[in-house]
Structure formats: structure tokens, C-alpha cells
């Protein structure tokens, strides 16, 4: 009986120690999970914020570009936004469309000034100079497109389009030959989506975009100054990962001691910090490019 009693005491002691170790390991795992979740939440929040800032920058740049293009072509900001929408829906290049309209304006001006070669290009598709001069540049583009579409000879279409729009017409053929209804539909989209904007409002956005451009320069200077220090931190973190790899390799049969779990928690935190740092640098790089 005494032996059995002693055995019970020994077993109880062993069991208590095992339970203590299990509780300690469970606590370490819970701490690891909590740390990872907190860092992941911070990472996702920063990622969402960086995307929002990037979207604002992109939109400002687009409006700034459209405003400058409207001045260049003598067209309203609203009509240029409509052209942008129509080009996107037609699968045509908006930049190519701007170039084509610019060339069209030059060709029309030369024809109106007495240029016989230029006037012949319009005559070949049955469009009068007077009717074109009464239209806005965007309207001229689609009016000429309608005239080209009505021609049956592909060689005539290609020759006339090249004479009027230059080589850029090949980038916008789907838009040019798609009909004037595309512009009208896109104009309705501009009104429906609340995209209508006066030149005064566009100028305000241009000023804001200029300020953003200066901010990019400042961020660029900050990035340049911060890179040496961050590189040193990244080197330390990478050495930590190397140590982690060595530690994992030394573990056998999945038996991770509590010290190993703490090390994993530390490594996970370092990894998340490095990821966030990388995202910061990527975002600043996008802003300053």
C-alpha cells in the first residue's frame, strides 16, 4: 500500500508539472496569436489608407491632365471627360484620341487657311469645312467619324483618316468609327455621375495637384534620408529570420519549447514590421515617382 501511495504521489507530481508546461505553452501560443492579429490589423489599416491616398492622387492627376488637354484643344472640360469615357468604353486609347483631335484641329485650320491638300481630305468624305468650324473639337471628331463610316472603300477611309488625324487614328479607330452616339451617351454619363465641372473648378484641382506634386518631392527627400537607417534595420531583421530558420531546423518531432514559441512571436512581429515598412516605402515610391 505504501508503494502504491508513493506511486500516486509521483504520478500526481509528474501530472502537475506536465499540466503546468501545457498551460505555459498554451499561454505562449495565445500571446503569439494576439500579437499576430494586432500587427495584421495595423497592416491592413495602413494598406487601406495608402490605397485611399493613392486613389486621391490618381484622380487629381487625371483631372489636371484633362483640364490641360481641354485648354490645348479648345474644348470644355466636360466634353473631354465625355471623350475619356467614350474612349474607355470603345477600347480605344484616350491619349491617342487627344493626339488625333489635336492633329485634326491643325488639319482643319490649314484647310480653312487655303491648304488644298488638307481641304481635299475633307472633300473626299463629303464634309464641308463650314459645318466643321461651327462644331466643338469633340463634335468634329465624331462628325468626321460618321462621314468615314459612311464610306464603302476601306482604302479611302484609311487614306482620309490618316490625312486628317495622322497616324494616331489607328489607335482610336474603334472610337472614331463607332458613331456620334458615343459622345452623346458619354455626355449623359458625365451628368449622371456628377462629373460635370467648370474650368474654374478644374483650375482649383490643378492648383491642388501642383501642391501634391511638391509634397511628392518632399516625400522623396524624406525617403532618401530614411533609406540608410531602414536598410540597417532590415539587415538586422533578416539576420533574425536566419536565426529563426536555424532554430526551426533544430527542433525535432514538432516539440517546440516555450522559448521557441516566444521566438516565433518575436519573429512574426519583426516580419510584420518589415512588411509594413516595405509597404510604406512602396507607397512613398508611388507618390514620388
Image: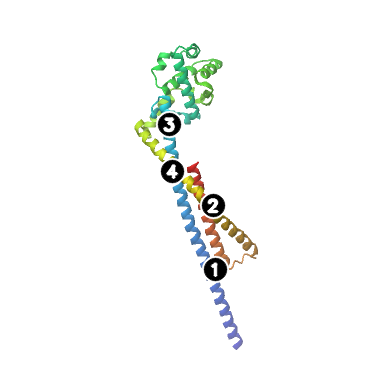
CA separation in Å, label 4 and label 1? 49 Å
Q: Are marks 4 and 1 in contact (CB under 8 Å)?
A: no
In the rendered structure, find residue 215 and report the number of the disc placed on it.
4
Query: Which type of secondary structure does the marked residue at label 2 adopt?
Result: helix
Seen in the picture, residue 119 relative to 101 is either above or below; the reply is above
In the rendered structure, find residue 25 and report the number of the disc placed on it.
1
Q: Residues within 10 Å of mark 2 (few under 14, many from 20)?
A: few
CA separation in Å, label 3 and label 1? 61 Å
Sequence-earlier tag: 4 or 1: 1
Q: Is residue 198 visible?
A: no
In the rendered structure, find residue 228 and report the number of the disc placed on it.
2
Sequence-earlier tag: 4 or 2: 4
CA separation in Å, label 4 and label 2? 21 Å
Q: Residues within 10 Å of mark 4 (few under 14, many from 20)?
A: some
Seen in the picture, residue 262 relative to 235 is either above or below; the reply is below
Sequence-earlier tag: 1 or 2: 1
Query: Which type of secondary structure does the marked residue at label 1 adopt?
Result: helix
Query: Which type of secondary structure does the marked residue at label 4 adopt?
Result: helix
Sequence-earlier tag: 3 or 1: 1
Viewer-closest of 193 and 250: 250
Q: Is residue 130 visible?
A: yes
Amino acid at each position: 500500500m505504501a508503494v502504491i501511495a508513493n506511486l500516486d504521489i509521483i504520478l500526481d507530481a509528474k501530472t502537475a508539472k506536465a499540466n503546468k508546461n501545457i498551460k505555459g505553452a498554451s499561454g505562449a501560443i495565445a500571446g503569439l496569436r494576439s500579437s499576430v492579429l494586432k500587427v495584421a490589423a495595423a497592416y491592413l489599416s495602413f494598406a487601406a489608407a495608402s490605397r485611399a491616398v493613392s486613389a486621391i492622387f490618381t484622380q487629381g492627376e487625371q483631372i489636371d491632365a484633362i483640364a490641360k488637354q481641354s485648354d490645348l484643344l479648345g474644348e470644355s472640360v466636360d466634353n473631354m471627360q465625355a471623350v475619356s469615357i467614350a474612349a474607355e468604353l470603345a477600347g480605344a486609347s484616350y491619349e491617342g484620341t487627344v493626339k488625333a483631335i489635336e492633329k485634326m484641329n491643325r488639319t482643319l485650320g490649314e484647310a480653312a487657311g487655303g491648304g488644298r491638300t488638307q481641304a481635299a481630305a475633307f472633300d473626299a468624305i463629303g464634309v464641308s469645312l463650314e459645318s466643321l468650324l461651327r462644331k466643338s473639337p469633340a463634335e468634329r471628331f465624331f462628325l468626321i467619324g460618321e462621314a468615314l463610316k459612311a464610306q464603302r472603300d476601306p482604302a479611302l477611309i484609311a487614306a482620309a483618316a490618316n490625312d486628317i488625324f495622322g497616324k494616331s487614328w489607328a489607335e482610336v479607330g474603334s472610337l472614331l468609327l463607332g458613331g456620334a452616339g458615343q459622345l452623346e451617351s458619354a455626355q449623359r454619363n458625365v451628368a449622371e455621375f456628377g462629373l460635370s465641372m467648370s474650368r474654374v473648378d478644374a483650375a482649383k484641382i490643378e492648383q491642388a495637384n501642383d501642391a501634391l506634386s511638391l509634397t511628392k518631392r518632399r516625400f522623396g527627400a524624406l525617403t532618401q534620408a530614411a533609406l540608410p537607417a531602414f536598410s540597417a534595420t532590415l539587415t538586422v531583421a533578416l539576420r533574425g529570420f536566419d536565426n529563426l530558420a536555424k532554430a526551426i531546423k533544430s527542433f525535432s518531432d514538432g516539440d517546440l519549447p516555450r522559448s521557441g514559441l516566444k521566438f516565433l512571436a518575436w519573429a512574426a512581429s519583426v516580419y510584420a514590421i518589415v512588411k509594413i515598412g516595405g509597404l510604406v516605402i512602396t507607397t512613398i515610391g508611388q507618390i514620388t515617382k
